[in-house]
Amino acid sequence: MSRTTPLSEVHQSLGATLTDFAGWLMPLRYGSESAEHNTVRTAAGLFDLSHMGEIFVTGPQAGEALDYAFTGQLSTLAPGKARYTVICAPDGGVLDDVIVYRLADEEFMVCANASNYPRVAAELTERAGGFEAKVVDRSEECALIAIQGPRAAEILATLTDADLDGLKYYAGLPGIVADVSALIARTGYTGEDGFELFVANDQAVPLWQALTDAGARPAGLSARDTLRLEAGMALYGNELTAEITPFDAGLGRVVKFDKPGDFVGRAALEANPEPRRRLVGLVARGRRVPRHGYPVVDASGAVVGEVTSGAPSQSLGKPIAMAYVRPEVSENDHLAVDIRGTHEPVDVVDLPFYRRKK
Amino acid sequence: MSTIPSELSYTKEHEWVAGLDDGLTVTVGITEFAAEALGDVVYVQVPDVGGTVTAGDAVGEVESTKSVSDIYSPVSGEVVETNQSVVDDPSLVNSDPYGEGWLFRVRIDGDPSDLLTAEEYGALTAGE
């Protein structure tokens, strides 16, 4: 039996096609997923992300505990700012990718993936053991609604007095939105401007209602997946797994070897800084879609990699994919994807596939 | 609740067949139930005109944002026409699955068997 979010009845009343995602019953799409995708690219879409985890780390040494637990240096984060980082196993494999928000000098919030947050909470509790820091998993009490798209700021501004102009990308501040007390964060997973609103469970329905009344349109996980793929963002379980290091995934920038002190995974990552594979973007020349798990082959037909995510791209008008290939594979190689037995030619491109106009 | 026109025949794999009453040539498509389950269709591959198809064989594919499915021929015979409009604009499968979204026509060879009536297909999909 899948778990439900505080917004599940709203999704059902909207006629959403529901799907199990990481043990949660979530809206896949409300109508046409292509239309939902385009709404986020041109106006504003609304996502229920209440399945994600919120883990609070507090205390005088909360920052130091997070520096030990994650690859990034969170102790230097200014209050009100956020940072993308990863949590590794001792062998350097990625256990989750998260956003850490510093809410106050001694208070941080870790936003973790739905499939991983119980593990992340357990790891953080253990890793914080030697520090003056307390870890509390508040995922069960906390709902998350994202408004994403070029009209997100304009729509949100009609519902709050918070200083949205002063709120920069990867920053967050507490505020009142439509009479609801929220943490307003300027973060997202779509490649567009937008906000993520963390609220108490019992406030999710009125907030969702106010945002749709103000002009945001519900969008499901199918659109979310194609939006993040176009933006070249990794999805845990596809591009990131416990067998992948941050270097493999092209996330070397989030590994801070120069920070003081040890962190879990440091020794293994320092010993193996060379990526064992390379994450690349692929654009199909034909119309068939390379999908998760399909082999990538070279001109001779030899397998040189595997697709991690693939979908038809609205923005490019062609199928796109991310894939891990052998490190020596170059843009000039004539690659193809084995799509159910037929080798369909693809071009290797730089990520992201889509970048919004500033 | 999706539409299931009573005058058509159906397969368990969610194809529909029209024109059986008239004799030789039938039209094949996929049902509204299947189109709704797939989501937005982005790619349709139909069999080649002039080729022969056998009932139950995978003869093409229909691909949406999230998934891909084989198209199974409901009948045996020769493919005499394919719908270039649906190849050019696969969204016709979603907008008009029993009309503009038809896929191919077959000059049938022998009597088709194992097809479902609208009532039987409705019972099959009611539980899904």
Image (tube, rainbow, N blue to C red):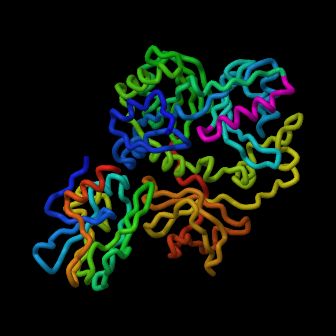
In the picture shown, does residue A231 fall above or below A326?
above
Task: Choose top left, top right, bottom left or bottom right for residue B14.
Answer: bottom left
Q: Is residue A191 visible?
A: no
Q: Residue furthest left?
A: B22
Q: Nearer the viewer, residue B85 or B23?
A: B23
Relative placement, left or right, of A227 versus A74 is: left
Q: Position of residue A267 (x, y in %)?
A: 88, 46
Task: Choose top left, top right, bottom left or bottom right for residue A105.
Answer: top right
Q: Nearer the viewer, residue A330 or A112?
A: A112
Q: Position of residue B56 (x, y in %)?
A: 34, 74
Q: Position of residue A272 (x, y in %)?
A: 84, 55
Q: Nearer the viewer, residue A77 or B54?
A: B54
Residue displayed at 21% across by 61% down: B98
Q: Give the mark count.
A: 0
In the picture shown, does residue A357 fall above or below B94?
above
Residue displayed at 36% across by 35% down: A12
Residue displayed at 82% across by 49% down: A91
Relative placement, left or right, of A286 versus A58 is: left
Relative placement, left or right, of A331 versus A200 is: right
In the picture shown, does residue B3 fall above or below A40?
below
Q: Is residue A230 visible?
A: yes
Q: Position of residue B91 (x, y in %)?
A: 31, 58
Q: Which residues are magenta?
A: A113-131
Relative placement, left or right, of B94 versus A155 is: left
Magenta span includes A116? yes
In the picture shown, does residue B120 fall above or below A296?
above
Magenta span includes A106? no
Task: Choose top left, top right, bottom left or bottom right for residue A335.
Answer: bottom right
Residue displayed at 24% across by 54% down: B122
